[in-house]
């Protein structure tokens, strides 16, 4: 046995071990791939916002920018690549896509486990069914419900009216409200008397894409109004020549409603926050497996 004087202590290299730990953590950092096709201004600004938010919370952003005229097969090939990449926990294809690309086909190719936008037909199908839960809920609708619950607005048993029936907001938000036990009506372009229905609502979700179509006189006193609309209207006083308004006449409605979201600064930031939440949930599922 070696005498005391021969023994040499093992030097613990804190720097090396810390580096190993850091790389272990880096392996667990959620990754979000954002795919954008073409150069639509609104899509570009949404994507820039999403990438910035990722950087702020330590989510790794994988940027895929494709030209407007990219063939559908090439876009789907890209989606398959991201499906197979273990560092990517969420895949978001920015909508709308150019006319020559079949949106449904592309969304259906995204791996269910990475569908952080919640638009895969199976996720939407589960959202529509009683007693089933999708892996991911669509970000904007999820954000609308989060705004209500965190503001102390109870949904159970309330009359909710959703204005608009798009696949991205109107339809899924009405399904989420139904799941939360509201009585739900959907108002759309073929509804004969939208004003009458909106007047009865305790909760109004405006997602029609029509500037200030919902007047203050339509709003029931004390109702909660969530305005998803983002419409650019001409405004010569602004440097850009336009300003953004919602689907609700904010000035009028804010005098009657109990709660109301502004545009901008209401639903928009929530959509991004829910995207980050979904990406984190996706990453956790992988780690738990």
Image (cartoon, rainbow, N blue to C red):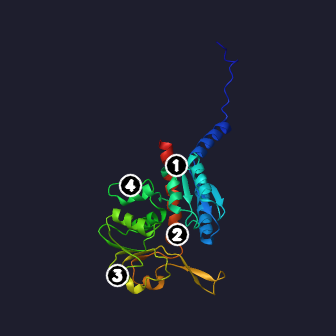
Residue at the location (59% across, 44% down)?
27
For the N terminus, the quadrant is top right
Q: How far is the residue under mark 3 from the one under mark 1?
A: 43 Å
Estimate the x, y position of residue 142 in percent, counting from the top left. 44, 63
Q: Marks 4 and 3: in contact by CB < 8 Å?
A: no
Mark 1: give few (<14), some (14-19) or many (20+) Cα within 10 Å. many
Q: Nearer the viewer, mark 4 or mark 2?
A: 4
| Residue 98 in the image, given as x and y percentages of width and height | 59, 67
How far apart in space, not on screen, are marks 2 and 3 (Cα)?
A: 25 Å
Tell me which residue sits at (41%, 55%) in the image: 134
Q: CA distance from mark 4 to mark 2?
A: 24 Å
Asked which secondary structure carries label 1, the reply is helix
Few, some or many residues within 10 Å of mark 2 (<14, 14–19, 20+)? many
x and y, in percent, of residue 225 in the image: 41, 76
Few, some or many residues within 10 Å of mark 4 (<14, 14–19, 20+): some
* Residue bearing the label numbered 3: 199
Determine which residue is flagged by label 1. 283
Tell me if residue 217 comes above or below residue 284 in the rendering. below
Residue carrying label 4: 133
Viewer-nearest residue: 1 or 201: 201
Q: Is residue 282 left or right of residue 74?
A: left
Q: Is residue 216 left or right of residue 234?
A: left
């Amino acid at each position: 046995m070696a005498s005391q004087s021969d023994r040499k202590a093992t030097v613990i290299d804190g720097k090396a071990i810390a580096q190993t730990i850091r790389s272990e953590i880096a392996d667990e950092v959620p990754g979000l791939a954002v795919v954008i096709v073409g150069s639509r201004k609104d899509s570009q600004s949404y994507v820039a916002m999403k990438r910035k938010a990722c950087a702020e919370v330590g989510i790794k952003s994988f940027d895929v920018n494709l030209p407007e005229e990219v063939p559908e097969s090439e876009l789907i090939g890209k989606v398959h690549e991201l499906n197979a990449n273990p560092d990517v926990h969420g895949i978001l294809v920015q909508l709308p896509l150019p006319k020559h690309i079949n949106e449904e086909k592309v969304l259906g190719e995204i791996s269910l486990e990475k569908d952080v936008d919640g638009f895969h037909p199976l996720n939407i199908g589960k959202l529509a069914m009683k007693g089933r839960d999708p892996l991911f809920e669509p970000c904007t609708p999820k954000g609308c419900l989060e705004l209500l619950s965190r503001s102390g607005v109870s949904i159970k048993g309330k009359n909710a009216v959703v204005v608009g029936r798009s696949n991205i907001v109107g339809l899924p938000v009405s399904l989420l409200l139904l799941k939360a036990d509201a009585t739900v009506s959907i108002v759309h372009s073929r509804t004969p008397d939208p004003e009458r229905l909106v007047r009865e609502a305790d909760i109004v979700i405006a997602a029609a894409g029509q500037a200030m179509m919902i007047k203050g006189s339509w709003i029931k006193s004390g109702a909660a109004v969530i305005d998803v609309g983002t419409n650019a209207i001409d405004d010569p006083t602004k440097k850009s020549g336009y300003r953004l308004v919602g689907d609700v006449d904010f000035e009028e409605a804010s005098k009657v409603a109990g709660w109301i979201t502004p545009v901008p600064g209401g639903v928009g930031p929530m959509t991004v926050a829910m995207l980050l939440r979904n990406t984190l949930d996706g990453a956790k599922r992988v780690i738990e497996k």
